[in-house]
Image (tube, rainbow, N blue to C red):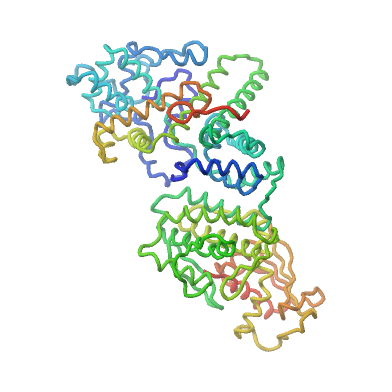
Amino acid sequence: MTAPDPSGPDSSDRVPPGPGDRAGRDPHRHDAGPPDDGDGGGRGGRAGPDRARPPRIPTPRSSVEDTGLPLAAPPSPTPSTSAGSAGPPVPAGSVPPPALDHQVLKALLGAWALAACSPAETAAVEDHLGGCGACAEEALRLREAVGLLHRPESLDLDPALRTRVLESCLGRRPPRIPVPSWAMPYDAETARLDALLQDIGDAEWHAPVRLRWFDGDEPTSRRTTVAGVIAHLLTVDGLVAVTLGLDDPLDTAADAPGPAARTEACWRAAPFPPTRSVHGPWREQSHNLVRTAAFATDGGSGRLPVPYGDFELPLRDAMLDRAFETWVHAGDIADAVDYPYEPPAPRHLHAMIDLGARLLPSALAARRRAGLTAPGRTRHLAPAGTPGRSLRLEIEGLGGGEWLIPLDSPAAPASPDHEVAHVALDGVEFCQLAAGHISPEEAAAGQLGDREAIRDVLFAAASLSRI
Amino acid sequence: MAKRDAPPRWDRKMQQRLARGEAAALGELYDRFASLVHGLAHRVLGDERAADGITREVFAHVWENPESYDPRQGPLRSWLATLTHRLAVQRLRTTEIAALASDGTADTDRLERKVHRASVAARADYIVTSMPTPLRAALELAYFQRRDYRQTAADLGVTEDEARRRLRLGLQLLSTAHEAGPGPGSGGTPPGHGGAR
């Protein structure tokens, strides 16, 4: 039933199921194939009615007028050449055409063109086309239109294309109001997660997800769903939104101001588990955050403090933290629905690792206060300003680099002269550790020097993780 | 998608933000329309890299000439589709002419037919994505899911009359893709219009 096109090469395009659809993801793929592929059985009327009486259908006028080109070959090959699909055309005599009048038959033309009529109706329509020029003309037009139906192209755009397109635009006309460099990782990560969410089906929003993190030195986890994760991101991103003067997405009171309490309050407040309806608000807020960060009152320096409950981060670091969390949870979601998901662009990954490295000294201090550090020979405090013992953190791979971590006090500057240990880790591995997805014992780290110091730093990295 | 029914206010604000030189607006514009632009370009050119190139050109054009879009003339969406269509067809013609020149055969009729077919296919895609949801849903069931019109009616919870009407109307809209208008905006959808070169 594909609209006959003797010039051929395009007709393969007309096979409807999108080639870009991921295997197993398209609910319709088992139904693959246009209706004329291998029918013949079942609904006998679907056997390409266009082949029945080609000569009676007038040739199209539009293509000539619009292009000035010579007429294409006649719209339908003779029945004998209608190779391939389906059985023989319905013999006009085999099903007595019901007596239907012009109006009724005309109304059937769309269904007829789609081979979606009963055999009797098909026969009646085709019988009518022989005698009614107006209907024959419309029939041809609609039949040709069917040939234009395609599955839409795959929606999977390469996320790197976004970066390339935007950069090329901004290179041609520099923005008067740029997105601050520290907001770019968040912009990119939310765009990547959004693309993943666009791609998943309704049911997948309810796929179970286990969120994992470290509480002290203990691995912890919490079960939720894909939609629950997005509600979590929406709610915690809300900390930044509120700081920037945007609406708080959380409309109930939380027990405490931090990410965990807000998330619990959000999950608790709704009588039903969240659905994909959280997608829109999450995306709108993430766009608004990027937009508003560019206008932030402190002239783009990003120093505005964002309260996280028991600590605070300057806006620029909070946006990096949110970028990191967006990536980590996008990875959780991708795992849950069995999609591949790549790490961030190297320079964004680098910025996230840098944030982690900068947070390590206070995480070490918190472990010391909680009595979690190894007792004994560690010098617990260096006088502020004097260089203390330091650990060299070497991060390998794209986005990597080297950081000197002061071990004794956040206030004591690190110094290569006081290096007591050297740890080498892959960048993504370090992020997985800081996300609480792998334990410090599992982290494949190359180690040299003070084992206790190394252990403390790896545990401190894990303690950066939160729900 | 709800986004499709966004009010024209969004278009107006977007145009103003782009004109003001707000980089974040460009990102939002891309997030909303990149898949439309890339999909249409891909339909015309049949090539991923070429479609990437057109996507870059389209957004660069809007970013560099935000005033070339006039919200009073119609939705941003159809304006972008028209622009994409024009640039993609231009590119197709250029590459095909180059190919013809290199192998010495100057079959311009074949070239024009190919350009015309690609152009119609892209207009058809645009019409399908822009037609009212009930029509699209009916076509989806009858064509892709191979339901006859009675089953289609049952699936949609409408009368058989209504199912027949939707199938016919949907195909009528789609058939306007053959009318070479100013762009994919023609026929059943807001007309495409000039403004972008």
Residue A429 pos. (x, y %): 62, 64
Which residue sits at x=52%, y=15%? Answer: A67
Nearest the eye: B77 or B54: B77
Which residue sits at x=47%, y=75%? Answer: A255
Nearest the eye: B104 or B115: B115
Q: Report the residue that reaches farthest toward the right.
A: A417
Nearest the eye: B40 or A402: B40
Q: Report the residue that reaches farthest toward the front.
A: B72
Nearest the eye: A409 or B103: A409
Residue A318 left/right relative to B11: right
Residue B125 left/right relative to A114: right
Residue B90 seen from this side = yes
Residue B100, image quadrant: top right
Task: Check the image and report above or below for B73 versus B11.
Answer: above
Residue A343 seen from this side = no
Residue A108, image quadrant: top left
Residue A351 left/right relative to A2: right
Task: Check the image and report above or below for B83 versus A374.
Answer: above
Residue A269 left/right relative to A291: left
Residue B189 pos. (x, y %): 45, 30
Which residue sits at x=73%, y=78%? Answer: A411
Task: Check the image and report above or below for A253 versus B106.
Answer: below
Which residue sits at x=77%, y=74%? Answer: A414
